[in-house]
Amino acid sequence: MYLRREKTKNKMLNIEDMKIKITLLLIVFYVISFSQVSNTGVMDTTDGEHIGKISVGGYVDAYYGYNFNQPNANSTPYFVSMNRHNEMNINLAFIDLRYNTERVRARIVPGFGTYINSNYAAEPGALKNIVEASAGLRLSKRKNVWLDYGIIGSPYTNESAISKDHLVYTRSFSAENVPYYLSGAKLSVTLSQKINLYLYLINGWQQIIDQNQYKSFGSQLEIRPNNKNLINWNTYIGDERSAAHPLYRNRYFTDLYWIFESGKKFSSTACAYIGLQQKIGQESIWWSANYSARYSFTHKFSLSGRVEYFTDPNNTMISSIISSNQFSSYSGTVGVNYKIGDHALLRLENRIFYSEKDNYFDQNFNAVKMMNVAMSNITVWF
């Protein structure tokens, strides 16, 4: 009788163990199957530590860059990110504070660094140090529809200012010549499990202080066909006349990018865009395309690279430092990445630029077609 009871008890324990194991396997399968590709085009990938309804996060991107053309001003031309030559410096550091409830949310991200100094140069006073600051309200109890006001991250191109999210460390020509931030209102609508729509009413093309009395419009359509791919299509239209550009009128812009994350060893992304700037008596077009890839040899060690081309024949977005030349350039990048735990990344990278015309200077201040920049970086986030 005692043996029977023990056998019955053991069977029940075995059945319970099997149930627990099956449940754990199902949870793991669910997480693997339904994990989504991160949209690296937006600055919303640091969760922080949660304390009730508040989360606190931080980010430090430190670097040392060496431009073998040795620019006189110790600043690599045409770039706002990681642009200092022969200096150990901070590209971007910030504290990310968030408040979230079922119906209300807010975000404050003050920051500093050489990226801030270059990218926010046109903004007055303390506005220079706001990476993001917004307040939002959920408009529907049943549907995921949000309206946010403030200084918000830009959706344009597959690269944001958060370098840890990207396959290569430095920013492409594409990302450096679209808005990194917007000021205005953002309407977020979840259309289905695979499609999100975002509409923007903003002050203009990367400007917190409005440069004219007109407002600009933007849109973002984010499509996730499966858990390995993301396709994002953005548009922009706005009147860009200002004191600095009195002849400018409407600007039209669209970009399309694709992100692939295999979940194993290989990741890649591609972006292409075209812009049209109307001026009194003239129209100017610029366009760009790039492709990046990363191969992971181990969980910690990976190799990455990027190829790109950017052309701006009328110097609408980039004014050539050789005043008589139109700007266009190729770029090739290769880098190695080493993960240190879950919250740190060490990177070494080399980037070569080639222009069909003399759009660069060498160390003797001679106009040349090539530029070579080496970069090292440590990024830590929490």
Image: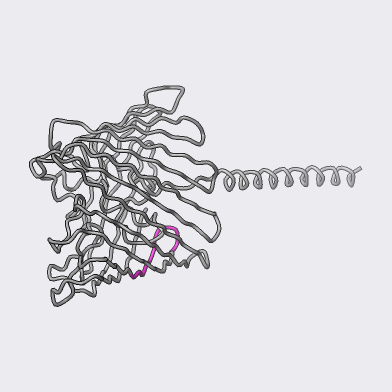
Decide: is 87 above or below 173: below
Dominant SS in magenta: strand
- 328 relative position to 256: left or right: left
Left or right: 298, with 165 as reference point: right
Residue 143's quadrant in the figure? Answer: top left
The reply to whether the magenta stretch includes residue 349 is yes
Location of residue 30 in the rendering, given as x and y in whole percent from the top left corner: 60, 43
Q: Quadrant of the N terminus?
A: top right
When the figure is inspected, residue 69 is found, relative to residue 205, above or below; the finding is below
Q: Residue at x 26, y 59 (%)?
A: 328
Identify the residue at horizontal 27%, vertical 72% (top origin).
Answer: 372
Q: In this view, does 17 lie to the left or right of 299?
A: right
Is residue 146 covered in magenta?
A: no
- At x 19%, y 63%, the residue is 77
Q: Considering only vertical position in the picture, is 355 above or below 125?
A: below
Find the residue positioned furthest to the right: 1
Q: Which residue lies furthest to the front in this view?
A: 281
**In x, y percent, where is residue 348?**
36, 70
In the rendered image, residue 154, in percent from the top left (x then y), is placed at: 30, 43
Q: Which residue is nearer to you in this view: 380 or 3?
A: 380
Q: How many marks?
A: 0
Q: Give the range drawn in magenta.
A: 340-350
Q: Residue reaching furthest left? A: 243
Q: Where is residue 235 in the image (x, y as percent from the top left)?
A: 33, 38
